[in-house]
Every structure is written in C-alpha cells, then in structure tokens.
Amino acid sequence: MKVAVIGGGAAGFFAAIHAKENFPQAEVTIFEKSKKLLAKVKVSGGGRCNVTNGCTSITELSKAYPRGEKKMRKAFGVFNTKHTMEWFEKRGIELTIQDDNCVFPVSQNSQTIIDCFLNETRRLGVVVKTESPVIGLKPLETGEIQLDFRGDNSAVFDKVIVATGGSPKRQGLDWLADLGHEIEEPVPSLFTFNMPHENVKELMGIVVEKTITKIQGTKLKSDGPLLITHWGMSGPSILKLSAFGARILSEMDYKFKIQVNWVNIQNINLVEEELLRLVDEHGQKQIASIRPYYIPDRLWRFLIEKAKLEPTKKWNELGKKGINKIVNILTNDIYDVQGKTTFKEEFVTCGGISLNSIDFKTMESRVCKNLYFTGELMDVDGITGGYNFQAAWTTAFIAGKLQESL
C-alpha cells in the first residue's frame, strides 16, 4: 500500500507516524511544499511548544472548540489529552502541566518535540520530502488517487491524507472544493485587538490575571488573564473572545467596543461594598495609594484618571458619586477596537473543509474515497492553550488508521 501525506506539519507527521505503525508494510511519504518541517510546532508557545492541555474531562475539553465541539467530543473518545501525554512520555519526552493547564515539554524547547517526530519517522521508515508541493489531486476509477507535482511529475497512491493546515484565503481550498467538498469561508481566529486611539496602550506589559470581557452589542463574553500590549489588548481572555467571535467580528470589520471588568466580579453591589470598606478603613488615605483588588499600580492610577478623579483625593472625600465612578470603571470599562493583529507563524483559521464533507469516525472524505483530512484544514479550531495541537493529534491519529467509511 502506498500512502501520501500532504503537509509536513504537526498533523501530517502524526498521521504519517500512525499510518506506518498501523501498516508497517506500507510505503508512507510526507510531501511538504516548503523547506521547513513542523514550522508551527517550532514557534508555538513562544518556542516552547504547548503540546496539549491538561484538561482530562472530554466534555470540558470539547467546549474549547468554537467550531467542531460535538464532532471533537466523539473523536476524543478515541484519542484525547491523556493519550497525547502518554504518547510523548513513552518516547522519552518529559512533560509538565502549568497552573493554567497548558502542557509543555520539561525542556521548555519546541525542538524537543520536533526531534521526537523526526526520530519516529526515521525509526519507522517514513519518507519525508521537502520542497515538494502537490499541485493537483485526481481520483482514479480504480479508487487510487493521482497526485501531480511540478515538472509534469505525478504519482499514484492507494491512500492520501491531507494535512495542509489552515488556509487564510478561500482560493487556497479551491483544489478541494473542485472535488466536491463543501468549504466554510476561512476567517482569522485567535487574534489580538488593536486600539490605535486608546491611551491604555501606554501600560503595555501589564497583566491582570482575572477579568471578564464582552463585545458590545453581541452575546460574546469571555474571562481569564488580560495583557495590555503596545497595540491594544491580548491574553487568554481576548484570544477566547476572538475565537468564539471569529465570524461575528469579521462581519463587523474588526471595529467594535469592548467592555472590560477588571475585577472579575459581576455583582456591582459587592464591588461597592468593598469600596465602602476601604472608605471605612483607609478614609484618610489618598485613593491612588490604596488599590482595590490588588489592581496593578499603573493601571489603578490610569483608571482613576479615566474616571476623572483626582489621585490625591482622600477615600472619605469621594462621596456616593465618586464611589459610583470607581465601581463603573472597575466593572464596565469601555475601549474602542479598530482592527486586529494576527501572528503569521501561529495564525489559526476558523473555516476550511466543512465537517459535512468528512466522516469524523474515520476522517475520510465523504465525496472522494481513500482521501482523508486532518488538522486545521478542517472547520475545527480551538481557543489558546494547546487545544489546536490536540485537535491535530486526535484527528491525525484517527486518519492514520486509514479505515474506510461504511
């Protein structure tokens, strides 16, 4: 049996390794269009490679996928985060689970994961060809699939696994649409918010660990750490909003208002009680010197000024009006977003091959026999925290079984 895997990224390598393990006599070849293998693995997690998430509840795990939640829940019954960790550890890769549940190699170096994959392909005899773009794919009457390469070269395979990753533009998927696959329009997911007109950018580098964020005029809501950057806002709370709101925010042309609750408390009466306690205990002190909820000092001073309060004013001089201003700025601080920033190396797309075109039990195409899909090429994407790699490992593991749909 001859098996071709198109794409030398995370999903491609994992699928090829499992195809060869399941069919040791098969000839398995990875075709990568560029010179680089496993490029996204290299840059993931700031070069440390966030291989998966420590969440072991399949129900909870599947909620991290704005697109594909139900399908992934079933797929995780076959291969999930526990299996991923066992797989790497069996191959001598020690892993560590951080407080935020992100899983990294103990080495804190993505090269450890890359070397693991390269060693596995060598050990198993998987052929890896770089600078080998596939420019055409043609199903034959025999059930085999012909792949066309540059220079009028072509080869015929019994099974083909497509693992080309997310395509930022629809035309990158035309070759699969031409075969009859439904395509969900690709739009960016996992991006940061640009705030060119907001002074909050001057506080770049500040992280607030627990926030609630909302997009005005929508039901979109998120929570978690928020990072202020030199272009606006990022961090898990923002990235989650961008993932769940990928289509909505695209339709808004990335121009909207964001509401930030800096204290992670929705009940404003509780916030008011806390401020009145500060008035009782620190009435004679200046408001700038006593920070409620341990808000970072620079951010607290910024918020006081934004609420048009004098930093030198004493707590017991605030009065009802002053307390209300602080409650409002802490729980409903509003910023104007004008655009997004996506990181080219780590971009994630919402959209791709519609899940209607794929049998998720086998990852086989519903319109082209012996053709399989895996990874981000499909309309499945997760929030930040190792979930996108987990989707790659899970779908690649299933695709690598090379089972035919019933």
Image: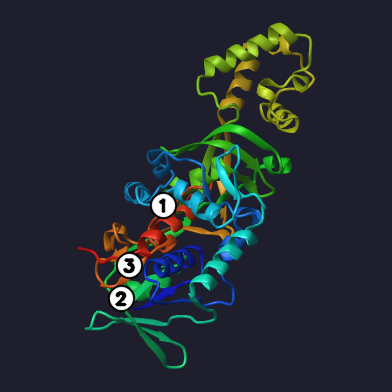
User: What kind of residue is marked 3?
Assistant: Leu
Q: Residue at x 49, y 75 (%)?
A: 125
Q: Residue at x 42, y 73 (%)?
A: 5
> In the shown orientation, is residue 5 left or right of residue 239?
left
Which of the image's four quarters has the N terminus? Answer: bottom left
In front: mark 3 or mark 1?
3
Q: Amino acid at mark 2?
A: Asp
In x, y percent, where is residue 53? 51, 45
Question: Where is residue 84 shown, x and y percent of the image?
Answer: 48, 52
Per the model, the C-alpha gap separating discs 2 and 3 is 23 Å
Where, by quadrant of the figure, is residue 203 drawn?
top right
Type of amino acid under label 1: Arg
- Asked whether disc 2 touches disc 3, contact meaning CB atoms under 8 Å apart, the reply is no
- Assign a secondary structure to mark 3: loop
As helix, strand or loop, the secondary structure at mark 1 comes to: helix
Q: Quadrant of residue 263?
A: top right
The picture quadrant where one finds residue 366 is bottom left
Label 1: few (<14), some (14–19) or many (≥20) C-alpha neighbours in 10 Å: some
Q: CA distance from mark 3 to mark 1?
A: 33 Å
Circle 3 sits on which residue?
402
Q: Residue furthest top?
A: 280
Task: Determine which of the numbered discs, if any, sits on residue 178 in the image.
Answer: 2
Depth check, front residue: 222 or 363: 363
Q: Any mark on residue 247, and which? A: 1
Q: Where residue 368 sits in the image (x, y, percent)?
A: 26, 72
